[in-house]
Amino acid sequence: MAGALTEKRIDWTGIGFAVVLTLVIIFPLVVVGTWAFANVWRYPSVIPQEFGLRYWNQTLARPDVWSAITMSLSLSTVVTFLSALICLPAAYAFARLEFPGRSILFFSFLAGQAFPKFGLLVAIAGIFLTLNLIGTFWGVVLIQLVGTLLFMIWIPVAAFQAVDRRMEEAARDVGASPVRVFWSITLPQAGPTIAAAVLLSFVGTFYETEGAWLIGAPQIRTLPVLMISFINNQPVIQYGAVLSVLLWIPSFIALLFARRVISSGSFAKGFGG
Amino acid sequence: MSVLEIRDVTKAFGATKAVDSFNLTVGDGELVCLLGPSGSGKSTLLRMIGGFETPTSGHVAIDGEDVTRVPPEKRPTGMVFQSHALWTHMNVFKNLAFGLKLRRLPEAEIKRRVEAVLELVGLAGYGHRATNQLSGGQQQRVALARSLVLEPKILLLDEPFASLDQHLRERLREEVRDIQQRLKITTLFVTHGQDEALALADRIVVMRDGRTEQAAAPDVVYREPATPFVAGFIGTMNLVEGAVANGTFTHSGFTVPLPVGDGTATLAVRPEALEIVAVNGGGMAKIHRVTDYGTHAIVDIELPDGTRLKSMTSEARDWSHGQPIDLKPRAFAAYRDNAAIHRSN
């Protein structure tokens, strides 16, 4: 009886959501993916007239694409590493210590995200100009570092705060020094959530465009910056599409990695969920 | 052979003194319970002995060695926390082995000692379990084992059974007592449960506002509470304030012969020592309610001014609501200025 009832009840709202989400998320991805592998695709055909890797060959044959990939990867790695180096101890301090100005400092990281970013960047670019940082690798590192602060402070702070203090005290009690407690207890306890923050900051840095463009151009060209110039200068859709697919790769790898490292609740936990 | 000495220890948080000029010596192999309501400073005191708080003034010594400023990792103390505080990213074996590894013991020795202590707490073969696969009682046993495996000179227990249900608490309490007796380990146990303290302790230290109200054997604390506070905190106690004149204590119709000087006094009578006598009209008080517990009954008594007292009787059917009665305390104590001035037994 109950089985028959559940069989008949169809969740139309759920199906509706699924269809809308599919259209909004999957459809553009499919279109871009198709464009990347289309040699010829003219109106009004629904599928490309000719599939092929012609534009991949053309794109990957360009040395500026390869240098942009290298640049993007090294930038993201350096920025994420420096960010972790600076932010994780700071996050621990925010989570565990009381010091004057703690909450004001804590919310100042949010302030950086609360204003229109471009205005802020132009002002910073003015300062960088006098410091001769415009167009340099480290100038871009610096500007992208600022962008990671919010994630790399707020999420680890929540992660550290979620670690039971008694666990740390119990470790002290059995003979572990404070440093040992941090390595053996606090970090493993907060680990999955911090891994999520590191991942977010890596992917976020990889896709960061405004800062890289404003501070780095024309010497420093990251993959997203290169894609913008491709789209602006050459009205061949395939170039943009191929680069889009290329840009998916790091986030795809990151997500695969994330599934292994991060339990599903970690992101939510990081934001106090 | 380990003796814990606490000398004149004070811990102030701002203007408030959580622990105030506290003195205590715990003898070798003794189990002392610190008993008091929340905020009495008992946990703060324990944390100072464990090294997690530093006294504002005073000294803590273990076997004559001053450890007041020694960090927790260098103290020969083992602490069991209320929340068990097991490391959830390690299995049971690793939880127990962590402290031994820090001491750089050989693998085989670590394995032997962990297995021995698991056996001791009744969890032999549980080493590979994850901590969240254990029940609340098992987790607390592992926490106890984690402290015991390091053979501390002083074992500190901070309300270790507070989160467990009554039945389990009683069983673990007995186990802890057995283990403590077998190892002859000097133990300080913090609790706010008087039954726990009465059942476990060689000696109970009743704390209030960071000070000792009474330090004595459980039966002494129960039978001869030193202050009205102790009298009210341990067991059920009727406390009545009244005036003494010409050798008689009076409070709203309730009179008791009390051979002390004139003045005010607080009378303390256990329900089992407060006898009630039926009268035909008049009487010192009226019965408000009778609650039958089968083995005994509790009679709620109301004095003319509304003060309520409790009496324990064997027969519920003899008494009914509104019945006039007289009160005859068989044994009682009287206090004045926070000290006992008279005991009748």
Image (cartoon, coloured by chain):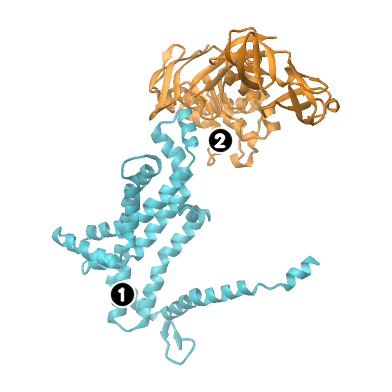
Q: Give the residue furthest to the front.
A: B282
Q: Amino acid at mark 1?
A: Ile
Whether residue A74 sits left or right of residue B147 in the image: it is: left
On the question of residue B202 being in view, the answer is no
How far from the left and from the top, in percent, is residue A49? 46, 89
Q: Residues within 10 Å of mark 2 (few under 14, many from 20)?
A: some
Mark 1 residue element: helix
Q: Give the letter of the orange chain.
A: B
Residue shown at 25% from the left, 64% from the top: A121
- Quarter occupied by residue A60: bottom left
In-front residue for pair B271/A87: B271
* Chain assignment, label 1: A
Q: Secondary structure at mark 2?
A: loop
Q: Which residue type carries mark 2? A: Ser
Residue appearing at x 60%, y 16% in the figure: B243
Pinpoint the chain carrying mark 2: B
Q: Quadrant of the N terminus of chain A?
A: bottom right
Disc 1 residue crowd, few under 14, some 14–19, many 20+, Cα 10 Å:
some
- Reading the image, the residue beneath label 1 is A228
| Residue drawn at (46%, 80%) of the image | A31
Location of mark 2 (residue): B83
Kindly report the distance in space between the C-alpha atoms of the residues bearing marks 2 and 1.
Answer: 55 Å
Which color is chain A depicted in?
Answer: cyan
**Residue B87 at x, y percent in the picture:** 53, 38
Q: Camera-side residue: A188 or A166?
A: A166
Furthest toward the bottom, the residue is A44
Disc 2 and disc 1 in contact, CB within 8 angstroms: no
Residue A123: image location, x then y, percent: 21, 63
Residue projecting furthest to the left: A130
Task: Identify the disc placed on residue A150.
Answer: none
